[in-house]
Each structure stands twice: as C-alpha cells, then as structure tokens.
Amino acid sequence: MGSQDAIPRSTVDAPPAHYVMKIQSFSLLAKNSIERYESGKFEAGGYKWKLVLYPSGNKSKNIREHISLYLALDDTSSLHHGWEIYVNFRFFLHDQTNDNYLVGPDTVRNERRFHKMKAEWGIDQFIPLRDFNLASKGYLVDDTCAFGAEVFVCKERSTGKGECLVMMKEAILYKHLYEFDNLSKLDLECYDSKPFNAGNFKWKIKLYPKGKGAELGNYLSLYLALADPSALSPCSKIYAQITLRILDQKQAKHHFGKANYWFSASSHENGAAIFMPINNFTNQNFGYVVKDSCFVEAEVIILGVVDALS
C-alpha cells in the first residue's frame, strides 16, 4: 500500500475480531529508541500473523510524523515456493472517548497477495502523529492506546513448482570394487552389488551376465543404479559422470566405459546394454573371469544435483 495520506477509513462499534494490541506509556517507545515493535503471534485463516508497528514512522521508507502499521505473515519458512495467500485485512484504532474504532484500509475489493518474498503489507502513513496525539480524538488517553486487526484469507494457490540446480565446484571421485563370484552358477537375469556410498547417495552395480533387452545372449550388460530411488523426491535429479570397468585379472587390460548421465527416481539405472561381447567375457584367454569370478569397478563423480526450490 502506498504512503498516501488519503487512506479510505470508516468507524465501527465492534472491536477487531482477531487481535488487539494495547500499549501503555506509548510515548516511552520513542524515548527508549524502539523504532519497530512486533506483536505476538495470532492465528487467522489457518495462518499465523503479527502486527508490526512503527510508533514514529517507518524510517526505512522515509516516513516521519506518522504511525506506520503493517500485517506480517509470521513464518514464511513453512511456505512452499510459489505458494500465495490472498488476504483481506483491516486495521483498527480504538477511540476511547466514543468507544468505537477507526478502521482502515478497506481491502475487500483490493486483496493483498502474501508470499515467501512479500510477507508484509500495511500502511506507511496509518495516521499522522498530530491527529493521534490530539486529546479530542480519543486515540491516546493517559498515554495508552490500542490497535487491532482482522484478517480474512480469501484464497490460496500455488503459482507452480520450482527447482534449484547446484553444480559442484569441487567434484569428488568415488570408487567401489565388487566381486561377482560363482558366475557359472548364475541363472538370474541380473545381479546387484552391495550398496555403496558416493556423495550423499547410495548406489549399486548391476550386472546382466547374459545381456539385457535386444542384446540378450550376445553382450554382457553393465549398469550403475541408485540403490533406493524411492528416497529421491520426484523433482530431484543427480548429474554424474560414471566409469564402469571389468578388470582383466591376468594382463590388467581392463575393459571400461565412461559417460555422463542424469539419475532420478524415474530414471535410476544408466549404463551400457552393449558393454562387452559375452564371448570375450567368458574367453579364458582373457582375464575377465578367473576362478569363476570377475571384478567390477565403478567410479562415480557427482557433477550436479537438482532439488525442489524451497
């Protein structure tokens, strides 16, 4: 709301429905350098609010010789990104002489939109101090006054979701070596390593000894997968560089593949369906299988992480 003097006002007999802030020895606020005072919390429309009073004007907005009064949403940390609350509110000032209330502004036709980046609305120039201090007005009697508020939430809505991508300045390489043994007795399509940590995530190596999909029977397939993809939120993603390697136990001529992938709850397994011809893998002239075992190594570098924007 603007800093104009002409704020639409009215007078009502009923006190404010939601909160009253009574102040005794009002003059001592300014004398004790209290430029801003926040009331306690009160609830209205399912949210917690507070009144914010500047007894000598909001100097950050260059307001002087007025009382500035605002309504503030108390806890914005609980609001999701994009969440908005549309509110009608009125401020009250007690006329103690006539036992009624000066009310302003009328926001019924001019709702205010509260959200994470704008959690405070009000009136920079709620009332001039010259009027407030006049004994004939009845607002300040025996240095005591009372302000109040009514708050009505009209609607709530989310403007959409958001995300935050964090690219790693100092990416760390994680290595994990796993032995798959008793290969001649393996009769399942896929075998998993034990879970291991890389970054803040758990991973596992997935070996398809007879291949996967269209290459079944021709190529060994090798993948890296998130061990618990359900732990990721739907919008979370991990960008990683992975190297998968089957060790040559005889001549150290290791067979490897390297690529960058996005991992997520819906795409939690990446690698190569055509990793190595099965004939090469099982050929005893090579050293990939020795004593019915092979060693697979995974290198993982987390390059970036996407999470929901809070």
Image (spheres, grey):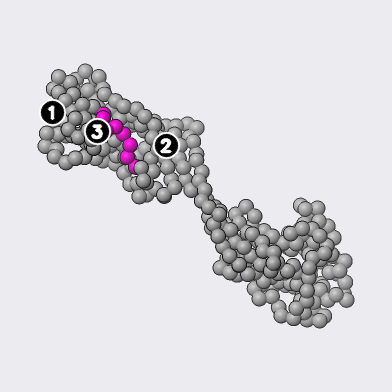
Determine crowd level at label 2: few under 14, some 14-19, many 20+ residues with C-alpha closer than 10 A.
Answer: many
Is 79 in front, or is 82?
Answer: 82
The region drawn magenta spans 268-275
Q: Position of residue 261 (x, y in %)?
A: 38, 35
Mark closer to the observer (2, 1):
2
* Labels in figure, total: 3
Residue at the spot x=81%, y=73% of the render? Answer: 139
Between the C-alphas of marks 2 and 3, the distance is 21 Å
Mark closer to the observer (3, 1):
3
274 is within the stretch colored magenta: yes
Residue that lies at the very extreme toward the front in this rendered image:
214
Residue that lies at the very extreme toward the top in this rendered image:
251
The residue singled out by tag 1 in the image is: 291
- Say if residue 179 shows up in the picture: no
- Most common secondary structure along the magenta stretch: strand
The residue type indicated by label 2 comes to Tyr
Instruction: Compare marks 3 and 1 and give the one earlier in the sequence.
Output: 3
Is 276 in front, or is 96?
Answer: 276
Mark closer to the observer (2, 3):
3
> Which disc number belongs to residue 221?
3
31 in relation to 269, above or below: below
The residue type indicated by label 1 comes to Lys
48 in relation to 190, above or below: below
Residue at the spot x=37%, y=37% of the render? Answer: 198
Instruction: Compare marks 2 and 3 and give the one earlier in the sequence.
Output: 3
The residue type indicated by label 3 comes to Ser
Residue at the spot x=75%, y=72% of the render? Answer: 103
The residue singled out by tag 2 in the image is: 239
Q: Position of residue 123 (x, y in %)?
A: 75, 62
Secondary element under disc 2, as helix, strand or loop, is: strand
Q: Position of residue 133 (x, y in %)?
A: 86, 69
